[in-house]
Image (cartoon, rainbow, N blue to C red):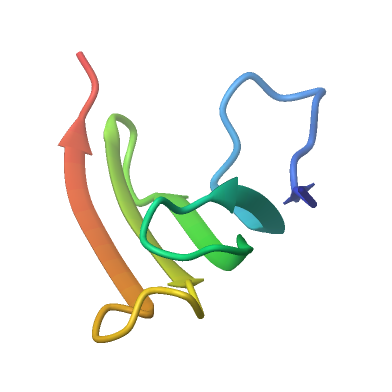
Amino acid sequence: MLTVKVLDSRRPVDRLHFDVNGGARREDNPNTTTMQTSTWYGVAVDVSVARAWFVSVSGLRQKDPASPGTNVTTQLYSSVTWRF
């Protein structure tokens, strides 16, 4: 798995946080006779828009070649939070 973070460790709260991740996983699928290799990649961005308000957006795509009909999964997530 690869993770890249854009941070300034000298400040307690950064205005921008950016993550990139990805990887491969081998697993035993009971529906097939061979080992299945799943791959995924994703991106996440967190932005401080005001003193205690944050906006987060992330996406993930996973490919499972041995699962017919559901071989690509895409997840999107967004949020607005207030930290008190």
Q: Residue at x 70, y 58 (%)?
A: 24
Q: Nearer the viewer, residue 62 or 53?
A: 62
Q: Is residue 17 visible?
A: no
Q: Is residue 84 above or below residue 38?
A: above
Give the residue at the far front of this rendering: 33
Left or right relative to 14: residue 3: right
x and y percentages locating residue 5 in the rendered image = 74, 47
Residue under the point 20% across and 13% down: 84
The image shows residue 9, relative to residue 36, as above or below, that is above
Q: Is residue 55 left or right of residue 43?
A: left
Which residue is located at x 19 percent, y 50 percent?
79
Q: Position of residue 43 (x, y in %)?
A: 54, 64
| Residue under the image location 46 percent in, 53 percent down | 29
Give the image location of residue 80, x and y in percent: 18, 47
Q: Is residue 53 above or below residue 57?
A: above
Examine the rendered structure and indicate whether residue 23 appears above or below residue 50. Answer: below
Outermost residue toward the bottom in this view:
69
Q: Is residue 54 left or right of residue 42?
A: left
Image check: 72 left or right of 79?
Answer: right
Q: Which of the pair 82/65 is nearer the observer?
A: 65
Q: Nearer the viewer, residue 74 or 19?
A: 74
Q: Position of residue 57 (x, y in %)?
A: 35, 61
Can residue 51 be seen here? The reply is: yes
Count all numbered tags in the image, as a single digit.
0
